Amino acid sequence: MKLKTIISATLLPLFVLSFQTASAAVPETRAFNRFIEQMVNKHGFEEEALRKRFNAVEIQPSIPEAMAAPAEAKPWFEYREIFMTEDRIEAGVKFWQKNEQVLGAIEKKYRVPAEILVAIIGVESKYGEQAGKYREIDALSTLSFAYPPRSKFFTRELASYLLLCRKAHINPMKPAGAYNGAMGLPQFMPSRFQSFAVDFNHDHKKDIWNDSADAAASIARYLAHHGWRSGEAVAFPVKARSDAYRGKLDSSLKPDVTIAQLRALQVEIPSQLPDAETVKLLGFQHAGGEDLWIGLHNFYVLTRYHSSPLYAMAVYQLSQVIADRKKAFNSAAELQQ
């Protein structure tokens, strides 16, 4: 069953929510009561009103199932196919063309390339098409009170969500989100929204659900805060003449090996990279073997947005394809003039 709920135009215009039929009420557990007590004593919420609000919250059993099977568990060649599709690339070009002026202004202010911002929105929500089918409060409550592995984290996010709704005068029962509690075009968690959401168009709303300017600027602010270096590369494909490099492949994300060390291990590195630069050696599985890449500092910054090398590589590769496609489109348009 689908229900369209209209929110005041002064807040967030429209969310389309999809409800799971096999839902349940929030369990009256010690953890839940502690959460209510915290929100009342620490943040000044009214207990009776808060409990009444949670009486209408629905625990969604499909959410823990989704948490157990994240896309990042797939091998690279399967993960890549989710995002490097023709319709997502075309949608990215159209999104960029539609928002070209504001994306240029955001790039100028935060020094993060427009193609990276466009690609992140494409990977995260497919430009709003896949921004989430659950009520945000249902998702966060399910993960807080019916998903023990990460209940502490999501309880903090639930508190952040209620606080941001109170501050922005948003009915917390209305906004939609993903199964993991991420929200809007950039799929921000509530705490990230609190720290980095931007009202870029100065309309007195930080609307990451419907406003492309606010969404893109919020992403740019986040990446800039985490050290994005303007004008620097993100990653390079490399090749190896032996298996000596394998000891440098591990699950960590931070750059931890110098170019000189990799060259000594018979890894062929682009000549423009200096020996002293620290990078991350990465292996990406494909059907016939493995592709080797080196991730530079900006690649590591992308993993601060989502802590997966698969995610960062998908964003990077999508950004390059979208940028090339847009450039070709512009060149063809100029020839026709």
Image (cartoon, grey):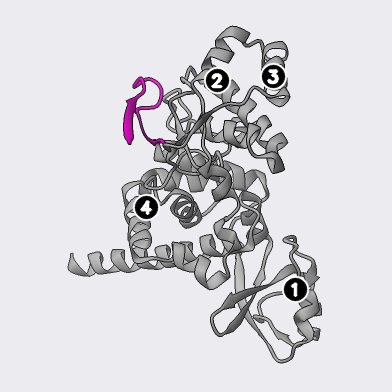
Please tell me whether mark 2 sits on a helix, a strand or a loop. helix
- Which residue corresponds to the image point at 64% horizontal and 32% vertical from the top-left? 145
Badge nearest the viewer, 2 or 1: 2
Instruction: Kindly identify which residue carries mark 4.
Output: 96
Q: Amino acid at mark 1?
A: Leu
Q: Amino acid at mark 2?
A: Phe
Q: Position of residue 290 (x, y in %)?
A: 61, 80
> Would you place residue 320 above or below residue 288 in this image?
above
Any part of residue 229 in sight: no
Q: CA distance from mark 3 to mark 1?
A: 45 Å
Q: Which residue is mark 3?
A: 33
Residue 159 magenta-highlighted = no
Q: Is residue 147 above or below residue 65?
A: above
On the question of residue 30 being in view, the answer is yes
Q: Which residues are magenta?
A: 1-19
Query: Residue 314's mark?
Result: none
Q: Nearer the viewer, residue 14 or 333?
A: 14
Q: Residues within 10 Å of mark 3 (few under 14, many from 20)?
A: few
Disc 4 from disc 3: Cα separation: 46 Å
What type is the residue that disc 3 sits on?
Asn
Q: Earlier in the sequence, mark 4 or mark 3?
A: 3
Q: Which mark is residue 54?
A: 2
Amino acid type shown at disc 4: Trp
Neighbor class of circle 2 (other Cα within 10 Å; few <14, some 14-19, many 20+) is: some
Q: Earlier in the sequence, mark 2 or mark 3?
A: 3
- Which residue is disc 1 drawn over? 249
